[in-house]
Amino acid sequence: MSFQAALATSFKSLHKPGNPILLLNVYDAVTAKAVAELAGTKALATASYAVAAAAGLEDDDMTFEINLHAVHGISKIAKQYNLPLTVDWQDGYGERLEEGIEKLLESGVVGINLEDYDKEKKAMIPVDVAAKRVGRVLDVAREKGIPDFVVNGRCDTLLHGGSIEDAIERGTAYLGAGATTAFVWGGGKRGGMSREEATELSKALGGRLNISMKLAPGMLTAKDLAEIGVARISVGPQLQFVAVKAVADEAARILGEKH
């Protein structure tokens, strides 16, 4: 077994319902190094929104090439610290799906987020097609000697008028196609995921659920989500928001000292 294959197997094993892996999403080599140096870090994960913002783009405008360029820098840090790297690969970039997975594997990546909303067509991908795309990713990974490649199948139906039942149907299909977890995105505009929603989803999906944890008072904490029984917690672009505010505050302080 190659080191990359062993890393994928190890990463997959960290997805335990009730004892979730906590991923602090990064967006460049600098933030990757800052997170990698922490003793509690088990893996590195990117957030496409933050990667796009760092490139001066909106999330939906980020290209295959720009996302891959960010991966190259972050993967160097992952290799330096012997950490698994999972990448937010958006919707897989249409018919370039297999090409993208091959390039990510070449960079040492052992997992991806794969969305079910087609950003070009501005529409949800039909559930059967989305599930087959999960399978296509895993087929490429197996062919390249990484049988435990981790797919976090993201479900965006709640953002586009769908119900919890729709999310459960989609999540179940993605898990059936080989995804390690289903990521039901609550969305910032609807206030994230409520305790009731997270509990219903976790029960229906056997805990094989990723929830994005909001870093704000009164929101579900990592302890709350572990008690609900999820297997994976992420924070999306929120560390970038914290970093940008810190830079702005310090810059304002310095400028203020000059006058």
Image (spheres, rainbow, N blue to C red):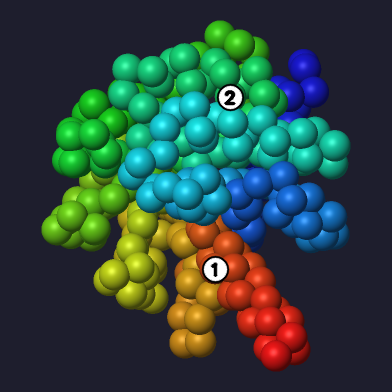
Q: Of callouts 2 and 1, which one flags the residue occurring earlier in the amino acid sequence?
A: 2
Evaluate whether residue 113 shows in this view: yes
- Asked whether 133 or 95 is in front, the reply is 95
Q: Residue at x 38, y 50 (%)?
A: 58
Q: Is residue 72 above or below residue 59?
A: above
Residue of label 1: 241
Q: Quadrant of the C terminus?
A: bottom right
Q: Quadrant of the N terminus?
A: top right
Q: Secondary structure at mark 1?
A: helix
Residue of label 2: 104
Q: Which amino acid does the dot numbered 2 rest on?
A: Leu
* Numbered badge on residue 101: none
Q: Position of residue 224 (x, y in %)?
A: 53, 76
Q: Which amino acid does the dot numbered 1 rest on?
A: Phe
Q: Residue at x 64, y 13 (%)?
A: 145
- Asked whether 79 or 1 is in front, the reply is 79
Please tell me how crowded label 2 is: few (under 14), some (14-19), or many (20+) other residues with Cα within 10 Å: many
Q: Position of residue 86 (x, y in %)?
A: 60, 39
Quarter of image, res 185? bottom left
